[in-house]
Amino acid sequence: MWLVQDDDTRIYLLGTMHALPAGTDWNRGKVAAAAASADELMLELSPAQLAEAGAVFQTLAPRDRPLAMEARLPPAALAAYRKLEADGDFSGDTLDDWAILVLMGQRVAQEADLSPADGVEAGLTATFRGAGKPIRGLESAKTQLMLFETLDPATQRTLLVSAIENADHAVKDVGAMAAAWSRGDADALAKVINEDVDRVPAARKAIITDRNRRWSAWIKMRMDQPGTVLMAVGAGHLVGDDGVPAMLRADGYRVTRVQ
């Protein structure tokens, strides 16, 4: 967790895990104190938009025309994919590449015993609702999913093949990411997150760097208003040279790691 502040405004930047093992003890100490002091909660998606995400996915995910997975994947990746498809109970032929990638990610989280109901956003939403404090979002569900939908086909295919080829290690990698997050090890977290996405620069730009720029711009505007905000977004957006804290520091803002 980082703090951006001036004379009358404080914005806490909390790096989250969207899904966690049941019973993970994260909502205490400085995190709990920041939540208690904040006037509002800013998430990637507001609760209303999060509730719409499934329906938006169902609208965007199907292909205009089915395309057999045999025509998309090399033989080794296809064999690995068939097992994932059977375990995940979905048919990729009718879905865009990015949508298959999303479903695979959900399956990996389940296999790693991670649940969105136990994630940071769910816990913070309950806390702020209980306190009667406003909860808003930086993006809409459609905007977020369109980040993937509008990736060029070659980038989508590269991401999908890479994910399938690394499927055997996916649960281990997710576990390593959760462990690094629990330790507060920003360098290890950045390494785990960046290893895959750095192989596909177009995806990194669209999914991480460009969004970080937009969120940094929102923070700069919000700094003109007094008060305290807890902004909770995926931890991968707060680490590394193009993380939100680094961008703000480069623009002359006072940013301090507080947790």
Image: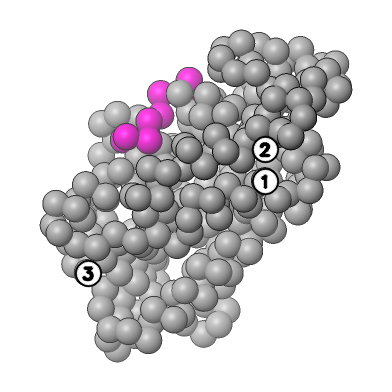
**CA gap, disc 2 and disc 3:** 36 Å
Residue 103 at x, y percent in the picture: 57, 29
Apparent side of residue 165 relative to residue 112 in the rendered image (left or right): right
Residue drawn 40% across and 23% down?
A: 113
Apparent side of residue 25 relative to residue 249 in the rendered image (left or right): left
Reading the image, the residue beneath label 3 is 39
Local crowd size for mark 3, using a 10 Å CA cut-off: few (<14), some (14–19), many (≥20): some
Local crowd size for mark 2, using a 10 Å CA cut-off: few (<14), some (14–19), many (≥20): many
* Residue type marked 2: Trp
Residue drawn 63% across and 64% down?
A: 210
Depth check, front residue: 180 or 9: 9
Reading the image, the residue beneath label 1 is 149
Between discs 2 and 1, the one toward the N terminus:
2
Between discs 3 and 1, the one toward the N terminus:
3
* Residue type marked 3: Asp
Reading the image, the residue beneath label 2 is 98
Range of the magenta residues? 111-118
Depth check, front residue: 180 or 73: 73
Is disc 2 placed on a helix, strand or loop?
A: helix
Local crowd size for mark 1, using a 10 Å CA cut-off: few (<14), some (14–19), many (≥20): some
Is disc 3 placed on a helix, strand or loop?
A: loop
Q: Is residue 1 above or below residue 118?
A: below
| Residue 246 in sight here | no
Residue drawn 29% across and 29% down?
A: 22
Residue drawn 50% across and 67% down?
A: 215
Between discs 2 and 3, the one toward the N terminus:
3
Quadrant of the image for the C terminus?
A: bottom left
